[in-house]
């Protein structure tokens, strides 16, 4: 099911979000998030962007692998994520499905490590560089009510 994407100005995008326990109901919601993200042709989507104040986001970089090799095969669900390491710096153009047609340069770490639970409740850690690092930071920010325009 395609979900509605909440746009800049809606209160849910500014909320501090709640931690989650993976469950079968959540699996359905996550599948809907992937469907929504694919239709919107984005590379990341956080739960507050579809109206839920939960600590959950998804990243699907597979379509971008041609331009960004770091995205090759990268399609993941992050529940209760935290950025546990960051280093370096990059400043690149960013956009957001909740802020259509607006893009701006944002400073981000060049490399991050993110720890999260997968949909089965197993902890994993993943490293991201380049676009992936930006995406992991951007989506984690959404869970703290932070928008790239800030
Ligand atoms: Ni965004």
Image (spheres, grey):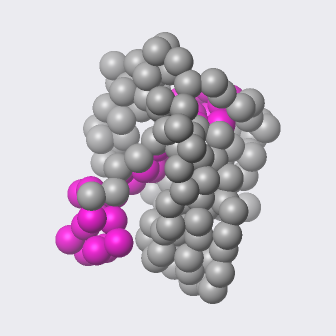
* Residue 49 image offset from top left, x and y in percent: 56, 36
Classify 59 as above or below 66. Answer: above
Q: Which residue shows up at 79% across the image and 38% down it?
A: 16
Q: Which residue shows up at 68% across the image and 43% down it?
A: 143
Is residue 60 covered in magenta? yes
Classify 134 as above or below 9. Answer: below
* Residue 118 image offset from top left, x and y in percent: 49, 38
Q: Which residue shows up at 27% across the image and 58% down it?
A: 73
Task: Give the side of residue 118 with respect to residue 55, left or right.
Answer: left
Front residue of 73 and 16: 73
Classify 61 as above or below 91. Answer: above
Q: Of all residues shown, which one is farthest toward the left?
A: 66
Q: Quadrant of residue 149?
A: bottom right
Front residue of 4 and 36: 36
Task: Give the side of residue 145 with respect to residue 93, left or right.
Answer: right
Looking at the image, how many numbered discs can be counted on the residues?
A: 0
Is residue 120 covered in magenta? no
- Asked whether residue 87 is in view, the answer is yes
Residue stretch rendered in magenta on the structure: 43-72
Q: Which residue shows up at 74% across the image and 30% down it?
A: 18
């Amino acid at each position: 099911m395609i979900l509605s994407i909440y746009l800049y100005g809606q209160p849910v995008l500014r909320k501090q979000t709640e931690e989650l326990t993976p469950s079968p109901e959540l699996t359905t919601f996550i599948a809907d998030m992937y469907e929504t993200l694919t239709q919107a042709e984005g590379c990341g989507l956080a739960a507050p962007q579809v109206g839920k104040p939960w600590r959950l986001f998804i990243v699907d970089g597979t379509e971008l692998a041609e331009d960004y090799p770091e995205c090759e095969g990268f399609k993941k669900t992050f529940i209760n994520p935290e950025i546990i390491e960051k280093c370096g710096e990059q400043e690149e153009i960013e956009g957001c499905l909740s802020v259509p047609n607006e893009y701006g340069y944002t400073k981000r770490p060049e490399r991050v490590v993110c720890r999260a639970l997968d949909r089965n409740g197993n902890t994993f850690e993943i490293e991201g560089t380049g676009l992936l690092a930006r995406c992991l930071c951007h989506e984690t920010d959404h869970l703290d009510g932070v928008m790239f325009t800030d």
